[in-house]
Amino acid sequence: MTAQTSRSPAPQVPSPLLRDTIGSIAVLTLDSPSTRNALSEAMIAALHDEVNSIRDDKHVRAVVIAANGPAYSSGHNLKELTARRADADKGRAYFAHMMKSCSGMMQAIVHLPKPVVAAVQGVATAAGCQLVATCDLAVASEKATFGTPGIDIGLFCSTPMVALSRNVPRKHALHMLLTGDHISAERARELGLVNSVVPAGTELNAAIDLAKAIALKSAYTLKVGKEAFYRQAEMNLADAYTYAAQVMTENMMARDAQEGIGAFIEKRDPKWEDR
């Protein structure tokens, strides 16, 4: 008789990202307080996977990205990156992989046809600040702070710069990037990095309430509008108007536009069919 040795299943590594559903709102929570919610390889992959799964989920009409612990996100996991300097190429291939993966995840948020709201309870630095800037809207605790301090460790925040410079006026973005200085939540609101500042501990509920208010609109119209907003922002003035006129013409032909205009004229609530 041949003895068989039983093998215990490999322990499952808990996901660094939690997902909850509140009505039609998906709440994604960064859940790695011990790393200050660093955007590790696992965190980036988990965020990207959830965003992709939400894309075609008709039950989800808006998304909130929140975090557990004192930090919203400290950016890339520098210990994880540094460990790969022992590779034959001194980490070059892995660094390129990580930057590409993170950039892909950020673009997935931008291209998601549903609004995404950041609920920022603490410090958001480097790629963590990039994540806030990438979300369509942001609600911050009065205790939150924001910064791109890569310059202090010899690593310019080049990829965070892309999102930051599309939220904040150029000279203010460069000041953050060149000095590494942190700014307060109120200053972030003044510069356009966040939409509102609320008392500490209320930012998640405020973000969910904002997402719920937006989710009451036509999902079709939100999809059209979000896509058009980001596309026209990269065009010159004439091209932007030409493109926007085409989008609005097509939007006028949609069932929800007909219904919404009719409801407005008839002074009644519209009944959306999301088409």
Image (spheres, grey):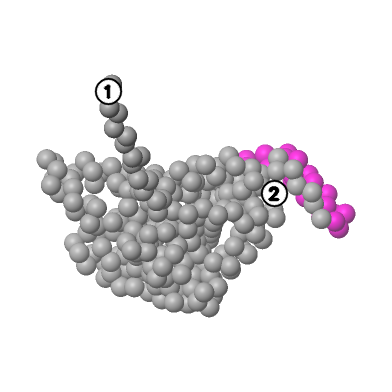
Q: Amino acid at mark 2?
A: Ser
Residue 122, which numbered label? Answer: none
Instruction: Locate the C terminus and report the quarter of the image it occupies.
Output: top right
Q: Position of residue 188 (x, y in %)?
A: 44, 71
The total number of labels drawn is 2
Q: Nearer the viewer, residue 253 or 71?
A: 71
Q: Amino acid at mark 1?
A: Thr
Circle 1 SS class: loop
What segment carries the magenta color? 243-268
**Along the horizontal axis of the image, is 265 left or right of 95?**
right
Pair 1/2: label in front: 1
Instruction: Locate the N terminus and report the quarter of the image it occupies.
Output: top left
Q: Nearer the viewer, residue 206 or 157?
A: 206
Q: Which residue is mark 1?
A: 2
Q: Is residue 178 above or below residue 127?
A: below
Circle 2 SS class: loop
Is residue 86 visible in the rendered structure shown here? Answer: yes
Which residue appears at 28% of the width and 42% of the height? 97
Q: Position of residue 242 (x, y in %)?
A: 58, 43
Which residue appears at 31% of the width and 36% of the height? 7
Q: Is residue 172 above or below residue 229?
A: below
- Which image quadrant is residue 215 in? bottom right
Residue placed furthest toward the front: 1
The mark that comes first in sequence, 1 or 2, is 1
Residue 218, which numbered label? Answer: 2
